[in-house]
Image (cartoon, rainbow, N blue to C red):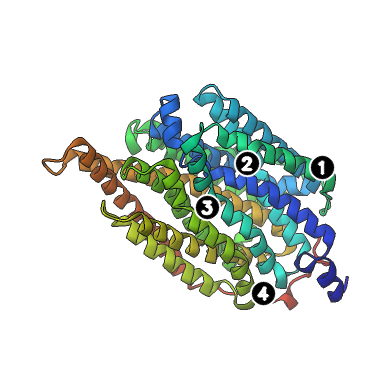
Amino acid sequence: MDTQDLKSVGGTFGSKGNFMVVMVMILGVFVAILNETLLNVALSKIMADLGILPSTAQWLTTGYLLIIGVLIPVTAYLLQRFTTRGLFLSAMGLFTLGTLIAALSPGFSTLVIGRILQAAGTGLLFPLLTNVVFAIVPIEKRGSAMGTIGIVITFAPAIGPTLSGIIVEHFSWRYLFYGVLPIAVFVMIFAFARLKNVTETTKPRVDLLSLLLSTLGFGGIVYGFSSASEGHGGWSGYGVLLPIIIGVISLALFTRRQLRIAEPLLDLRTFQYRIFRISTLIMIIVMMAMFAAMMLLPIFLQNALGYTPFEAGLVMLPGGVIMGIMSPITGRLFDKFGARWLAIIGLLLIAHTLWQFAFIGVTISYVMIMLLNTSLMLGISMLMMPVMTNALNELPPPLYPHGTAIIGTLQQVAGAVGTALLVTVMMNGTRQYLQNPIPGQDESTLKMFSMIAGMKSAFLLAFALVVIALIASFFLKRSASPEKQPTAKQISPS
């Protein structure tokens, strides 16, 4: 297909058929990613309704990320073994079933089961979408393509708290799932009618030992970090240290095995590429800071400053709008200038915002909180998709499925670990303040100032992590030029 045809029938995605494939998949990814942050503002209502503690309610978010992190390593195998259409419909089917179970759940255990099924579907969707884009879009247009996708990918988690606040303010938290359910069903019907296969399948062998080690490794680390925030023995308890130790040992054995077997579950040769290594480190740190902030801020607004769920959700809306607007702009800027300066500027914004959040006071205005959150989201929008695209551009086509699986796995695990770690730091900071309170404070004031102390500790840690990412961003370089990389026609979908 010549250049004129590309412009007339598909532009960036190459053809009308390719464009339709991507649009169908974007709809599914949108509703799945929206679901990741939809419960953040609703956690207080769920805790009251089901009679659970914050450390237990955290598992609705952390557990969701844990399942995704455990499943994504398998996507490299699944992307090569099964068709685009079959994988997408299976993933959406799991997500839809989980949404229905969560909506009808009579208690916390059933609600967690629903979230697990939702996570199982979500874990397949984004790596599938990314792999398809890199299979059909030439390198010189991938920034624009990923920017288009980023409108949805970045906008969905940002508006989740706002939608959640509006719904929870007037209805039961169950309507969060009832509202998602018809959209998921529509996407499945639409995909069944219009989605076509754009990748070829092979028959790679799945290594069961690698799968077991991967599950124990990623699962053990996230479980250990999450257990620490429940306060059962703290970081020195067996329920925390044992899973982390098992996880670290399993990941070491997993890494060793992947480098020795002929058909690895995750091909770790991707880390031979310097830009891929640096980009992955940056994305891990940003995900830790982003997911933690998006969970901590709504809880702080409601429990410490007394805002309603609607107000706590609304404060996130401008940031979500900015992310949606900026995503295609940063995509085009990436195609023209590369990822380095976008990442540096974005990380400077994130670091500045986290520093401001660390010294937040009781007199801070609602508008200022909204502006700070918008600054955080602007910084994230400037670097996430460009840095990810730059990382994958560095890889040869056969490693695309493994690159997307590795990035997806580490992002989700980083989000879960970051959330659990910073929640733990916040709770410890709160406890320390309560042990040495300012004399004369009433119960309400004591609660407010103790949470502020905890938030300061958590956001200062997030700030320190982002500074590390900022230093790493100065070592980013642009991936190989389009002339040195295969075009869309030359890329083997397998």
Task: Tell whether label 3 touches label 1 (CB within 8 Å).
Answer: no
Q: Earlier in the sequence, mark 1 or mark 4?
A: 1
- Real-space CA distance between mark 4 and mark 3, rounded to the nearest whole angstrom: 32 Å
Q: Is residue 149 visible in this depiction of the protein? A: yes
Residue on which the image places disc 2: 71
Q: Secondary structure at mark 1?
A: helix
Residue on which the image places disc 1: 192
Which residue is painted at 53% across and 38% down in the image?
Answer: 219
Which residue is painted at 67% across and 68% down in the image?
Answer: 144
Q: Residues within 10 Å of mark 1 (few under 14, many from 20)?
A: some
Q: Secondary structure at mark 3?
A: helix
- Real-space CA distance between mark 4 and mark 2, rounded to the nearest whole angstrom: 31 Å
* Residue farthest toward the top in the current orientation of the protein: 106
Task: Tell whether label 2 touches label 4 (CB within 8 Å).
Answer: no
Q: Place residue 424 in its image quadrant.
A: top left
Disc 1 marks a residue whose amino acid type is Phe
Task: Tell whether label 2 touches label 1 (CB within 8 Å).
Answer: no
Which residue is painted at 78% across and 59% down in the image?
Answer: 19
Residue 471 at what x, y percent from top left? Answer: 43, 69
Disc 2 marks a residue whose amino acid type is Leu
Q: Is residue 156 left or right of residue 469?
A: right
Which residue is painted at 73% across and 59% down in the image?
Answer: 133
Q: Place residue 328 in its image quadrant.
A: bottom right
The answer to whether residue 61 is above or below residue 340 is above
Q: Earlier in the sequence, mark 2 or mark 3?
A: 2
Residue on which the image places disc 4: 480
Choose between 113 and 31: the one closer to the eye. Answer: 31
Q: Earlier in the sequence, mark 4 or mark 2?
A: 2
Choose between 44 and 403: the one closer to the eye. Answer: 44
Q: Is residue 485 left or right of residue 331?
A: right
Q: Earlier in the sequence, mark 1 or mark 3?
A: 3
